[in-house]
Amino acid sequence: MNNAARRDGFTLVELLVTIFIVTLVIPSFLYFFKTSLDRALHYLDYRYAVTRISMAESLLRMPVYYCGYGMPVSADLFHKSFGNMAVEPYSWNGPVSSSAYNGRENAQLRIVYGTPEDSVTASAFNYEQTYRTIHMSENFSPSHITADYYGYSRNVKSWILFGGTIPEPTPLQIRNISGRNLIVRSYLNDGLLVPKGDKMYLLSAMKVFVKGDILYSYDFKTIGDQPRVRGIADMRFIVDDDRHKITVYLLVRGYAKLTPAANIINGAETCPPELLHEWQGLNTGYELYASKIVWRLPNCIGGNFLSGKNAAVQF
Amino acid sequence: MHRWKFSFRKKRCGAVLIAAFTLMMSVAGGSSVLALIAANKTADIKLLQTNAMRRDNAAEQADAVAQKWLKEVLINGGGSYLQSFNVNAPALTEPVLIMPDNLTAALSAANGHVDIAVFAVDENYADNYDTAAERLGIPSAVPVILLVNNKNKKEQYLLKKYMLITEIATEDGDSNRKYIFAREVSVVKYKDVLSVIISSIQKGYSDDK
């Protein structure tokens, strides 16, 4: 071996020194790499959880806002306004309530609300004087509303709502549809008036609950339970009738099983005790994220001065 | 034929180093630009969310102030409003009551100086207000007499409707597009005493159908 060749290679000492330095550096590099990877995975997990929370929120936002729109809030008047029918959703205790589901307290939300339509009243509607006929500004899609000729309709598509009903909020049942005209029936008040230009809302009702890691809704306009958001571990609803508020507690998971030990619940301080008690001891392998949302119910207005009184409009 | 062999001792190393450095800087620069674009997009989304929340927040608070203002204007406003509480009262050609700006000035300042306009519209309006009423979705309701059975005694109330409108300017650059809170308000007169009943509320944009 000549001198030039010898200069180009490494000596054993150089190799040993290199191996020693690499041995020293690699663990810290690996530690840094693992920490970064863990952080990235946790952040991704957290983003998944936030997305799930947002999706669950969006499902409820509109129904909560228009909950109770154009209908009585008290249980008695609510039942009466829907002809005292003993079937859901008309038999519920008012536009919003929570009930037990699968043995879990307050785990099912039952909500009745209005869905805005394009049509408005083309002229003032007077229950007696206009022969129960409402003239509307637009034609109707048969998939949105249906008439029920026999009364006491169980179909929610046969009910409409108006925000400006006088003397009090009253749902109207559609008996017949003829072009832009609707023949309706009121079970609450015969002396009813709906002003000209009042926007029509469709009656909508929904149950929301969690079954096997999936958030379901049961919309009364369709059939069966509809899966809406995956990765929802639990959901509880506390309705405060007096203060027209609803508090929604959500427990969601991320995307991957990151925790071999018992459940880690992020934001556990926001959970009600019964929810914590149920989930803290379990080991699902997932990291859980808790969220608490408080919504006002701006259209669940109680304290109508006419509540419990029999009123008629005189013209 | 000359075979090129890497060695720090050869003169071409400088060129190799410069090329490697240039390549590295290009990659770093490219990554920085991409990161900046991603950060900007994220900030834009956050800004949109923040603006929407700010707008909702301002509208909710302004609506609460407006309710109090309307109650005070009608109940403490004196005889001028009582005159319109009559079944035979003529339709109003100027049905709008405008809330003074100073009542929402603090709210506007606390929510990024968003433009807030609050006004109440008497639903017994004349034909000249039809177009504006249609745009804002305000029904037309004449005052009516309610016969109320109270403990087997028939009492006569007079009911009149107002629409309380809270308009918030949107952040999308279109000055004509407003975010609107519209609240039904019933005012009941019984033996010259007025009581205000806050009722349903709708929300939407001024260009919604």
Image: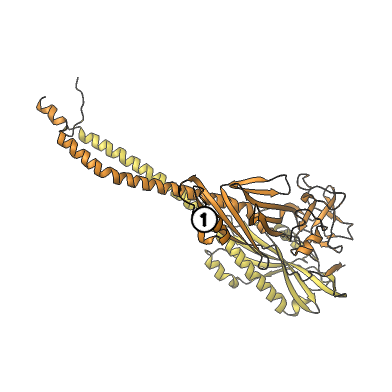
Q: Position of residue A188 (x, y in %)?
A: 83, 62
Q: Is residue A263 above or below residue A310?
A: above
Q: Residue furthest front?
A: A281
Q: Give chain A's shade.
A: orange
Percent position (x, y) of residue A134? 84, 55
Give the side of residue A315 with respect to residue A210, left or right.
right
Q: Quadrant of the N terminus of chain B?
A: top left
Q: Residue at x 62, y 46 (%)?
A: A228
Q: Residue B121: name its quadrant.
A: bottom right
- The tint chain B carries is yellow
The kind of residue tagged 1 is: Gln
Depth check: give the residue in front, A185 or A151: A151
| Residue A313, horizontal then vertical, whole percent | 85, 67
Residue B33 lies in quadrant: top left
- The figure's colour scheme reads by chain
**Furthest-left residue in this view:** A3
Q: Residue at x 68, y 62 (%)?
A: B182
Number of numbered tags placed on the structure image: 1
**Observer-nearest of A239 and A144:** A239
Q: Residue furthest top?
A: B1
Chain under numbered label 1 = A
Q: Position of residue B156 (x, y in %)?
A: 85, 74
Residue drawn at point x = 52 percent, y = 57 percent = B50
**Residue B52 makes an appearance in the image:** no
- Provide the secondary structure element on which disc 1 rests: loop
Q: Is residue B70 above or below residue B8?
A: below
The residue indicated by pointer 1 is A280
Residue B178 in sight from this viewpoint: yes
Report crowding for label 1: few under 14, some 14 to 19, many 20 or more residues within 10 A (C-alpha).
Answer: some
> Residue B7 or B177: which is nearer the viewer?
B7
